[in-house]
Amino acid sequence: MHALLILALITLSASTPSQVRYDGYEVLRIVPRSEDQMQWMEHFEETFVSKLDFWRMSHSVNQPLDVMVPPRYQTELRELLESRGIGFSVHIEDVQKLIEESMKSSAGVRAVSGFDYNTYHTYEELMQWVTNFVSEYSNIAEEIVVTRSVEGRDIKAIKLGRKSSGKPGAFMQGGIHAREWISPATMVNVAKKLAESYGSDPDVTAMLDSFDWYIVPCLNVDGYSYSWTNDRMWRKNRQVTSKRRCMGVDLNRNYDYQWGGRGASSNECDETYHGPSPMSEPELSGLTTWLLGLKAAGQPFHMHMDVHAYGQYWLYPWGYSALVPLPPEAGDMDTVARKATSSLANLYGTSYLVGGSAKAMYAASGASEDWGFGTLGAKYTYVVELRDEGRYGFLLPEFQIQPTAEETFEAIKELGRSLVAEYGL
């Protein structure tokens, strides 16, 4: 590895300006075509996980890796890849330009109207939407303040369902990673579609009559707010660490199920930093205490879904290792997931890869899907990576919010049909 590149990359993460810009930053897609290249790529990832922003990881031959590279190091990195005979392409030419293009319509619409389901919204707007939404659908909706974040922001959930006791629960959350804006936008739209379809769509009516549906539109509220005000590409929460220049914990490595293993880092500067201890973060400790409290009070959970971006995956446990056998329930999880993604594809032709999380994508210990299945006990536990496959990555344009939400809603309806058939009252 070139010494100059190593030195330059070490300085890259040394400070974060108040308004981070990505002028001229590009996203390279790198694809290993042999086991030798794959082994070198794994070394490359491990060496620079704290220095470069890996948008998408690769752990098998022909699986693409996406990495954001600042202008100063692009030539040298290209030369390095070429010297190894590893193919690559420029997937995004200018990250800052894409950020600005994605924000234009939001600013314009927000200035002249109220809440718009076709645009991205700030934390404050999302929380106000929760209150307004519950008021509009008060016959089936309830607002819950689940917990508070590191910086003291409310984390809210919506409870949707016919108001009666004795029903099991189904849980969905978005926004665990701050920069994945399409996730909260999709959760908001799915909640709206469920509520407005109740009483007219037989499938949705059965879903809400048989289950309490809990939806947390945005879990990582501090990180999400920071991605609006300071750094659009921020991922973690805003916890202060022992290295004050390296803020934040990856909430999706902080769960207390198989914490601290593969795919998580003990380095505070890494994007996958797992925190000082399992459940160290108030966002997660508060959320999981609430869910387990509902379970202890007599409400079993049969579905747990964590919605991310990007890549178009529909995954189930285990996430902590690809070397352990899949759980006995994996066959049922796979069958239902394939039905869901088939319904999703029927709308716009969007294709999702279905499989065990660590086997189909990469290992991530201390993650939501393993906790949802292994601790909460939800048989149908999924992590979903929404659109797209990398053309825009985390910067999905607003014109894709509605098609993403519409097709995801069709998948959730299919999941609901399966849940009602197996557990419905």
Image (cartoon, rainbow, N blue to C red):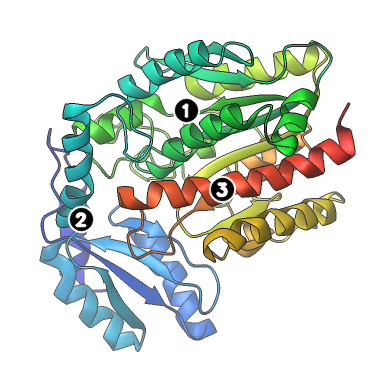
| Location of residue 122 by image quarter | top left
Q: Nearer the viewer, residue 235 or 311?
A: 311
On-image quarter of the N terminus: bottom left
For image coordinates 16% across by 28% down, the residue present is 111
| Picture coordinates of residue 180, whole percent (x, y) | 39, 44
Q: Amino acid at mark 3?
A: Thr
Q: Are marks 2 and 3 in contact (CB under 8 Å)?
A: no
The residue at which mark 2 appears reads as 98
- 198 vs 327, left or right, is left
On-image quarter of the C terminus: top right
For image coordinates 27% across by 60% down, the residue present is 68
Looking at the image, tell me whether mark 2 or mark 3 is earlier in sequence order.
Answer: 2
Looking at the image, tell me whether mark 1 or mark 3 is earlier in sequence order.
Answer: 1
Q: Nearer the viewer, residue 32 or 329?
A: 329
Q: Nearer the viewer, residue 317 or 302?
A: 302
| Picture coordinates of residue 322, whole percent (x, y) | 68, 60
The residue carrying pointer 2 sits among few (fewer than 14), some (14 to 19) or many (20 or more) residues within 10 Å by Cα, namely some
For image coordinates 62% across by 32% down, the residue present is 197
Q: Which mark is residue 219?
A: 1
Looking at the image, tell me whether mark 1 or mark 2 is earlier in sequence order.
Answer: 2
The residue carrying pointer 3 sits among few (fewer than 14), some (14 to 19) or many (20 or more) residues within 10 Å by Cα, namely many
Camera-side mark, 1 or 3: 3
Q: Which mark is residue 291?
A: none
Whether residue 44 can be seen here: yes
Q: Nearer the viewer, residue 189 or 45?
A: 189
| Location of residue 210 by image quarter | top right
Q: Amino acid at mark 2?
A: Leu
How far apart are labels 1 and 3 at the CA level? Answer: 19 Å
Q: Amino acid at mark 1?
A: Leu
How far apart are labels 2 and 3 at the CA level? Answer: 24 Å
The residue at which mark 3 appears reads as 408
